[in-house]
Image (cartoon, rainbow, N blue to C red):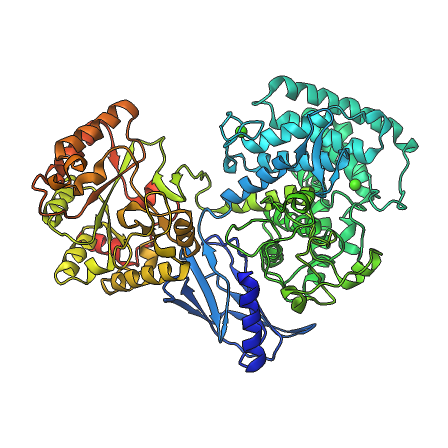
Amino acid sequence: MMKKLLYLSLCLIMAGAPVWGAGSRIRINQLGYLPEATKKAVFISESNTKTQTFTIHDALTNELCATLQTIQPWGSFDKFNSNYIFDFSSFKQEGAFYIKAGDTYSPTIYINQNIYVNATDKLIEYIHSQRFGDDISGGWWYDASNRNRSAVINATVTYQLLYSYNQHPEVFSDLADFQGKKQPNGIPDIIDEAKWGLDWLSKVNYKSEDPVVNGKLVATFALASDVLKNFFPALSADLATKATEIYHFARQNIHTASLNNLEDILTEENWKDDMQLAATHLYFINYNSEYLQDALDFGAAEPVPQWIFSNCDKPLQFYPYLNWSPFLLMQVENPLIKKNYQHNMHIALLRARLTAQENPFNIGVSLSENSNNKITALHNLCFTYRKQTGDTTFVNMEDALFNWIFGCNPWGISMVTGLPENGLTPQHPHSKIYIESDKIISGALVNGAISNLCLKNTETERQTYDGAFERYQTEWAIYHDHVNDFITNQPNIDATASLLHLLTVRQANGEKKEFFDKNQYDRGGINRFNPDKKQIAIIFTGHQYTDGYKKIRSTLNRHKVKASFFFSGDFLRKAGNAKKVKKLIKDGHYIGPATNHYEQLADWNGISASNMRKTSFLNDLKENYAVLKKLGVNKQQAPFFNPPFELYNDSISKWCKDVGIYLVRSTPGTYSNLDYTFPEMRENYYSTKEIMDKIMQVERSNGLNGYILQFHFGTNPGRKDKLYNSLSTIIGGLRNAGYQFTDLYSATNLISEPKPEQHVQKKNKSKK
Ligand SMILES: [Ca+2]
Ligand SMILES: [Ca+2]
């Protein structure tokens, strides 16, 4: 509703006063970009606009971070009179930003090393949620409304799960067991899910089926026999045998199969692609050259994906869109085979690029029904071709296809439900679960946009829709976020499985290849980091008192410990405090915000204080950052936030995340943060000895791995027994017990410490 109102009011403003860039939008990948990646946005405008520069700003403070002129004009397209491609690849800071061009603002842009990791988990969770029945009579829901016992779809989903895992096992996590219960079972969740598919596929009676099914079964079983070797050795051996058996059956019975039955919309037209993939995988199991010859023969019938050359192909006509066989066969030591397949792929990609050049979004597929299957397939083709040949000719198209899925499209919507969490995503998917319970399951890629021409060909009754998106419909591309639109807005499980590969290879391209979020969260705030490492982070919070300054500073320096300090705006403005903070910066400590006036944000139960609203909270935080900036700390250098009294709720930590800030609090249980208490608090008072004993008691019973110990920068004068006087003993004791002290960047592993040109490290350097 908020979005609708906002949209309406924007329309009214624009209708009332035609301004520069009326009807202009900047479309971005809402999921985010890797720092080192090519980063592009598309500017579309209904009016004639001239734009030569754009700027990048911090999402919270609005601080200008870059002014860029890397703009490529595209000209006019359908109802959009001016279109530009904004290239901000040179901007490599991590955090949350937005682009501004004239009066036009983009949504929040996230740049981070790890943005795609949780996304792969989400997709797998979605596929998991689509299981029904048991492994004999069940399967996965297909197209979100029909129970699917189609071996074609199930085999394709299973194959893609196995394929993605096999390419980059390092990016997949084990968060749940086979049933999806949140407890690791020693098997990556993507393999748990593939196992479900395999169990079901093993029951398929292949003898009555045609080669489109059998080919897929063989390829899936053969790939599984390789991938599952270490997880399920017995099953792996069985699958290899079964694959061979089915292949020989299929090979002998090809001539009797009923093919080319296009009467039924869901009938697959091509089968040699499937048999080629089957023969290819068998060849890689036993290196029998007969399989290789078969694979080459079948492949000769369909050298390039046929849908690249067709316009309104039907959903399963050329299934499964991408045949991985050529890429696998290029690994065979035979220059002729390699050259031949390279050549074929190049031709296919050149044709796709011609299509891409006809629209400002650089999309190289014809938008027929289930276009997102083709978008993901073409992306995977671009990527694999580039990987195999080193030829980067099609990399722009590759990026554009990826960005399209997550919001760089005319409607500015991510086509994946609930991803990103805080983005504009389908709110009314055509799915059984949504229709019956109003619930949207995250992580599903919907069918995607369709051209008006292909929509007419579907012969479905045209419906009229209204809403914010109608403005962006063109002859080229139509999409409705409407529950009735089963053509464009229906969750699509095999396209989702194919999207996994896009996210997998992109995450594997990140600098931190192996990343799992090992932090522990309470209400969205980090309250402990990686429990596998014998490391501790020390943080201090300061608002009213400064009496600990000298002792804390000298102790940390003596022990060479880098700590984190969180100061309120009031603290930072107080005379004399700036000098202290500057010295702490010089020592190399982290300095971050604790709100402007250190007012309680929520009560102990997480209920917001005085109906706290997002804007007032963020404005308050902005004030805190403004004072920090005067001391030389900009927001990019202070991405961690510690709330007053460690009180907050889910909304507050989510609002922080929206603007690129991570909420951090102490790990409960050690009493470290009770060092502010004073004797008048009677039974609530904790002496330094009590606190120290408690810390060491927790250490002995549970260990303090990944603990965040929070202390106060100064305390009420009523407390004479100051804990900071014993800080040296605490640090020394924990060091003797084998702990290292770490900063929040390396502790949480969520964001990289700003590069050396920014002040903290620079000052360290000059000191050395
Ligand atoms: Ca698991
Ligand atoms: Ca096929």
Give x and y (percent) for residue 146: 75, 40
571 sits to left or right of 417: left
Q: In this rendering, is residue 185 above or below 324?
A: above
Name the residue located 68 percent from the left edge and 73 percent from the top edge: 79
Pick the residue in front: 299 or 137: 137
Residue lying farthest to the left in this orientation:
720
Name the residue located 56 percent from the left edge and 22 percent from the top edge: 230
Pick the residue in front: 115 or 297: 115
Residue lying farthest to the right in this orientation:
256
Image quarter for ligand 2: top right
Q: Quadrant of the N terminus?
A: bottom right
619 sits to left or right of 716: right
Pick the residue in front: 605 or 35: 605
Give x and y (percent) for residue 368: 76, 56
285 sits to left or right of 257: left
Pick the residue in front: 156 or 18: 18
Give x and y (percent) for residue 115: 48, 48
Residue lying farthest to the top in this orientation:
234
The quarter holding residue 276 reads top right
